[in-house]
Amino acid sequence: MAILITGGAGYIGSHTMVEFLNAGRELVVVDNFLNSKPCALERVKQITGKDFKFYEVDLLDKEALERVVCENGIDSCIHFAGLKAVGESCQKPLWYYHNNITGTLNLCEVLQKYNAKRIVFSSSATVYGNPSSVPITEDFPLSTTNPYGETKLMIERILKDLHTSDPEWSISILRYFNPIGAHKSGLIGEDPQGIPNNLLPYITQVAAGRRERLSVFGNDYNTPDGTGVRDYIHVVDLARAHLKAIERAEKITGVEHFNIGTGVGYSVLDIVHAYEKATGIAIPYQITPRRPGDIDECYANPAKAAEILGWKAEYNIEDMCRDAYNWQLKNPRGYDD
Ligand code: NAD
Ligand code: UFG
């Protein structure tokens, strides 16, 4: 039986495919390349020496999606496909709601019809809103501050209702903290279009000389050095969590939520210094005003994933910075090279 991967050409999807193919899993992949390139899939083949079926399908095209599921004996799904930029979601909320929610509804309807009632969903720490304390456990109150986060929370609720209505479903909701880094081969990595929104891709482009200096968004947060604190996790560690999640979903039914983070918070300046140490390259920066919507601190208590999934992050912050830089060095313009 094959596993359907939605959004497999994307940053996290491509790294997860490598782990699944190396584990001998049969994969069928769909992506519409809204935010990715076919080259990422070729690179996955290059790294693993393994093949998989790919369909250029939009989740909004339910008939095409149904054909893929029907033809391939799909029995479970890892669902990455979605739009993910917070700022863009505020400018184009209808697009975000339509793509992320309708796409997921189509997917669940098709999976249910073909009795493939097993799904691992890419949620986000954004569903914890502005947490009242850290580290965050899975039972913290949920709230969101932007349409992107709203789609994640809505999908979590849809999946819970789906299981209530049909207890045969096995649903694993992974709440990712801040994925960074790249596969150690340097063949796949994060390939942001235009000016990066996120910290690590921006620093990486400064290190490569593509941008002059980093803007540190505020140094008056309630944190040890005043800059925002986050839980950065190596994308390969994150990818491996999906393998553990699907193995568990193959054994039990139900809905479970897991924080996927390291449990360690690093400030923006910690990251700048770790990057400098890992690469030997100075990262010029300036302090600028806060970015609207940013919070002081966000890091996980990942104990539930350790206890139930048997998963724990293995890479440290310098590994993450080194691998991000290695990807940048080998692909100065991302997959366009
Ligand atoms: P990404 O943009 O690199 O990958 C998403 C993939 O989904 C892309 O290849 C895109 O082309 C595809 N896609 C989007 N809409 C589609 C549709 N309607 N039909 C078919 N394919 C479609 O993003 P990523 O960083 O790999 O994130 C994967 C998932 O994890 C997303 O759901 C994202 O919201 C979630 N997530 C990401 C982060 C992060 O910081 N990267 C953090 C938390 C959660
Ligand atoms: N930051 C800067 N300068 C930059 C970019 C970011 O100082 O150029 C700071 C931010 O203010 C924040 C930290 O670096 O303190 C991390 O910012 P990111 O944009 O890299 O990540 P966020 O924590 O804001 O958000 C990310 C994803 C969200 C997701 C969230 C939790 O972008 O989609 O992690 O998973 F919801």
Image: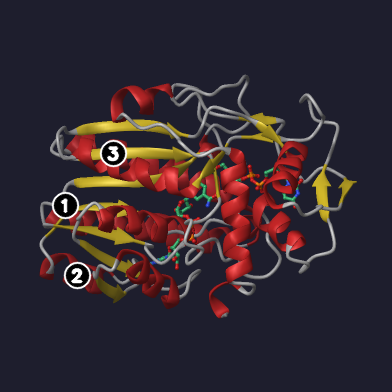
Instruction: Tell me what residue is drawn at x 75 percent, y 47 percent.
Output: 276
**Is the residue marked by circle 1 packed among few (<14), some (14-19), or many (20+) residues within 10 Å?**
some
Residue 112 lies, with reference to residue 70, above or below; the image says above
* Whole-number angstrom distance, CA of label 1 to CA of label 2: 14 Å
Left or right for 275, reference 309? right
Q: Label for residue 68?
A: 2
Establish whether ligand 1 lies closer than 8 Å to the Cβ of label 1: no
Question: Percent from the top left, x then y, of residue 112?
Answer: 16, 52
Q: Quadrant of residue 8?
A: bottom left
Residue 250 lies, with reference to residue 210, above or below; the image says above
Quadrant in which the N terminus appears: bottom left
Q: Can you tell which of label 3 and label 1 is closer to the viewer?
A: 3
Q: Label for residue 112?
A: 1
Instruction: Tell me what residue is drawn at x 29 percent, y 66 percent.
Output: 29
Question: Percent from the top left, x then y, of residue 183?
Answer: 47, 56
Q: Residue furthest front?
A: 280
Question: Percent from the top left, x then y, of residue 25?
Answer: 20, 55
Instruction: Tell me what residue is drawn at x 22 percent, y 35 percent.
Output: 248
- Residues at discs 1 and 2 in contact (Cβ within 8 Å): no
Instruction: Tell me what residue is drawn at x 17 percent, y 65 percent.
Output: 69
- Look at the numbered disc 1 and give the secondary structure of its residue: helix
- Look at the numbered disc 2 and give the secondary structure of its residue: helix
Which residue has dot 3 on it?
A: 244
Quadrant in which the C terminus appears: bottom right
Establish whether ligand 1 lies closer than 8 Å to the Cβ of label 3: no
Q: Residue furthest top?
A: 133
At label 1, the amino acid type is Gln
Q: Can you tell which of label 2 and label 3 is closer to the viewer?
A: 3
Question: Percent from the top left, x then y, of residue 200?
Answer: 66, 52
The answer to which of marks 3 and 1 sits earlier in the sequence is 1
